[in-house]
Image (cartoon, rainbow, N blue to C red):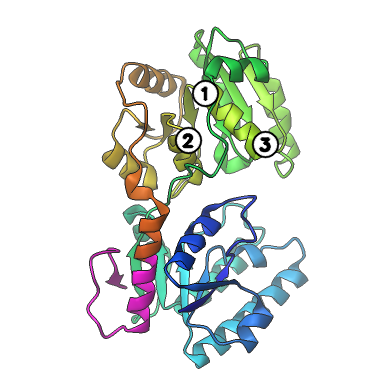
Amino acid sequence: MKIFAAPAFSNEKVNPYNALLYRELQQLDVKVEEYRHSKALRTPCDIVHFHWPDGDINRPSLGKSVQRMLLLAVTVCVLKLRGTKIVWTVHNTAPHDARRPRLSNAFMQWFARRCDGFIFMSEANRAAFYQLYKTSPTSHYAIIPHGHYRGCYPPAIDQQVAKTQLGLDPAKKVLLFVGMIKPYKNIDGLMQAFNQAELADYQLVVAGTADTAPTELRSTMETLKNANTHLFLRFIPDSELALFMSAADVVILPYKAILNSGALLLALSYNRPVIAPHMGAVAELQKKLGLHWIYGYASDLTPASLQHALLALEHSSRPQECPLDNYNWDKLAAQTLDFYGQLRAPIQAPTTLTDSKKTP
């Protein structure tokens, strides 16, 4: 089987998700190549697998966005005429930072109706998608979870050594957020809740680039910073990512909205418990892994809910290693290959291996 993936390996330094999946698929004798419009138009393949199709059309220039939409639309039409199957892994039902939401939504509705199959990472992901999109009655879907990141980044080191290297207070516990700083991630709300909760035993660490964050958000964060808050507002390379995770006692994801989160799996891969809103994949992973690994809070993050979450995790016993065997990439690749096979032979009854079903 030959597939083109958008992306396959080109984004590995930013997010290893795709590379981890496709290297395992290559071990299953699947030929995987990086998607390019020109390649897709001139070279036949069995599957074209998109991950963030909206990303290429969300450009600052309206003219460039329309040009990209037209190019993708023409390519998709040619692929459909050729009989190539089109798969979309729906990481987000809608882009978090769409410059032109109406235009983006109209195009993605068109794109979704041309897809033969969808991969969702949770049942909540699937439900949210079908509330927003109308799809072809012949399309299928599979629920295949996000994989873990063990072995992808440097190993953890001694916690006190990590705190010292980062210039943190060695006597206080570390509540960590790490990742790109964007408005929907609610970092200012986290800082406000932390300040008001008066958690004397904790220090808050926020690490990640804020280059694309609005100026007012960066200004607000600086204003909210106090003696128990440490801001590392810069790109965090892989070597330092391990350092921050090693220093952490608890990782927090204070997002306003979340369906799937690689950051959640990253924290669990380092065996760090996580606080996150009780929605999307967070709620489903909590059921499978337990409250001692994932504490999901309802509604907005408040000083009281933050206090309660930290107290609950402090009094929970957990093994040294989070049980993530079901999220090994070889298993997820096998499920993905099974789904590919079903799309190429749709008259066969779907198997339950990938929880694959026909679109409702």
User: Which residue appears at 53% of the width and 20% of the height?
Assistant: 158
Residue 292's image quarter?
A: top left
Where residue 289 appears, as percent x and y from the top left, is: 30, 38
Task: State the residue at coordinates (47%, 82%).
Answer: 46
| Horizontal relation, residue 326 to residue 202: left or right | left
Helix, strand or loop for disc 2:
helix
Point out the image quarter for the N terminus: bottom left
- What residue sits right under mark 2 in the picture? 267
Residue 34 horizontal/vertical position (percent): 61, 70
Q: CA distance from mark 2 to mark 1?
A: 9 Å
Q: Which residue does the image show at 69% across and 28% down from the upper left?
A: 232
Outermost residue, bottom side = 81
Q: Are marks 2 and 1 in contact (CB under 8 Å)?
A: yes
x, y percent for residue 303 = 46, 20
Do we see residue 222 in this rendering?
yes
Q: Residue 256 lies in magenta, yes or no?
A: no
- N-terminal of the pair, mark 2 or mark 1, is 1
Q: Secondary structure at mark 3?
A: loop
Inter-mark Cα distance, 2 to 3: 15 Å
> Relative to 81, does residue 205 appear above or below in the rendering?
above
* The residue stretch that appears in magenta: 336-360
Q: Which residue is mark 3?
A: 236
